[in-house]
Amino acid sequence: MSDENVTLDLLGSRLLGMTADVRDLQQRFDGLEARFSSLETRFASMEARFAGVERRLGVLEERMTRLIALVVRIAERQGVSE
């Protein structure tokens, strides 16, 4: 170490500087946390929307299957062969 004396004033100013840096970092991390939280909320809503679309497509698939079965039965009664 050098021959400089460490005074309480120097130590206090260094500590204040470090405290300000830590507060700045904490504010930045809080901002990032808020952004990630909003992204998580958006992804959750997108997941819910996709689940709704998937349910609707399942219903449509079931209806199409029933409709095709009905058309096949009608064609069989009419005597239409493949």
Image (cartoon, grey):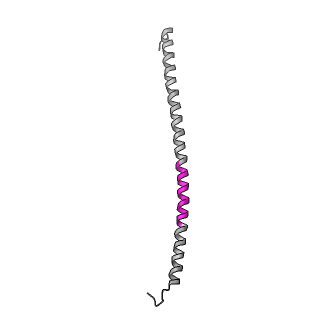
16 to 42, vertically: above or below: below
11 to 72, vertically: above or below: below
Q: Is the magenta stretch mostly helix, strand or loop?
A: helix
Q: Which residue is more in the foreground, 62 or 4?
A: 4
The residue lying furthest to the bottom in this view is 3
The magenta stretch spans which residues? 25-40
The x and y percentages for residue 59 are 51, 27
Counting labels gives 0
Q: Which residue is more in the foreground, 10 or 69?
A: 10
Give the residue drawn at x 54%, y 42%.
46
The residue lying furthest to the left in this view is 1
Quarter of the image that includes the N terminus:
bottom left
Give the residue drawn at x 48%, y 89%.
5
The x and y percentages for residue 45 are 54, 43
51 to 24, vertically: above or below: above
The x and y percentages for residue 22 are 52, 69
Residue 32 belongs to the span the image colors magenta: yes
Q: Which residue is more in the foreground, 75 or 2?
A: 2
18 to 53, vertically: above or below: below
Give the residue drawn at x 53%, y 52%.
37
The x and y percentages for residue 73 are 48, 13
Give the residue drawn at x 51%, y 77%.
15
Residue 5 belongs to the span the image colors magenta: no
Q: Which residue is more in the foreground, 14 or 80?
A: 14
